Image (cartoon, grey):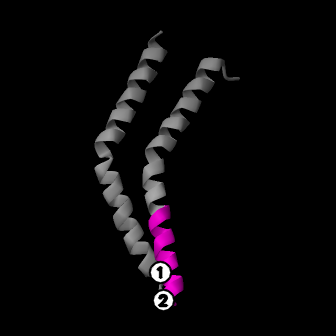
């Protein structure tokens, strides 16, 4: 069904996707954790209070890491085309 090179390309694609998405997701998790602790301490239970800071931080992290993301994607694309041409 799949040969070894196809499975390796799929695995590498998933690894690159995780590497690109991980910093943004981790930033969202950390901000959510901090906001949840603050909400528990102050007894404020507003759902939008946690949502808006997470969105802002995740967008900022994505914007800061945009050059790194493009470099990783370009490296993967170069590797993909190099392997497919051989």
User: Residue 51 vs residue 68: left or right?
Assistant: right
- What span is colored magenta in the figure? 29-44
Q: Main secondary structure of the magenta part?
A: helix
Nearer to us in this view, 86 or 55? 55
Residue at 47% x, 56% y: name it.
25
Q: Name the one closer to the observer, 51 or 44.
A: 44
Q: Which residue is mark 1?
A: 38
Is residue 39 one of those drawn in magenta? yes
Which residue sits at x=43%, y=59%? 27
The residue lying toward the viewer, choosing from 41 and 76, is 41
Q: Give above or below for 22 relative to 6.
A: below
Where's residue 60, x and y in %?
A: 31, 58
Residue 37 lies in the magenta-colored region? yes
* Left or right of 65 in this view: 54: right
The answer to whether 25 is drawn above or below residue 41 in the figure is above
Q: Which residue is mark 2?
A: 42
Q: Residue furthest right?
A: 1
User: Dot 2, how many residues are within 10 Å of its Cα: few (below 14), some (14-19), or many (20+)?
Assistant: few
Q: Give residue 29's position: percent from left, percent from top.
A: 50, 63
Residue 50 occupies quadrant = bottom left
Labelled pair 1, 2 in contact (Cβ < 8 Å): yes
Taking the image as drawn, is residue 45 in sight?
no
The residue shown at (44%, 50%) is 23
Quadrant of image for the N terminus: top right
**On the picture, is 12 further left or further right than 75?**
right
Q: Residue at x 45, y 62 (%)?
A: 28
Residue 12: x percent and y percent?
53, 30
Q: Secondary structure at mark 1?
A: helix
**Whole-number angstrom distance, CA of label 1 to CA of label 2:** 6 Å
């Amino acid at each position: 069904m799949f040969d070894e090179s196809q499975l390796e390309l799929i695995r590498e694609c998933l690894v690159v996707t995780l590497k690109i998405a991980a910093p943004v997701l981790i930033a969202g998790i950390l901000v959510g954790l901090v906001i949840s602790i603050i909400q528990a301490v102050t007894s404020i239970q507003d759902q939008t209070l946690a949502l808006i800071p997470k969105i802002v931080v995740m967008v900022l992290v994505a914007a800061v890491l945009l050059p790194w993301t493009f470099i990783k994607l370009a490296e993967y694309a170069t590797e993909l085309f190099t392997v497919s041409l051989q």
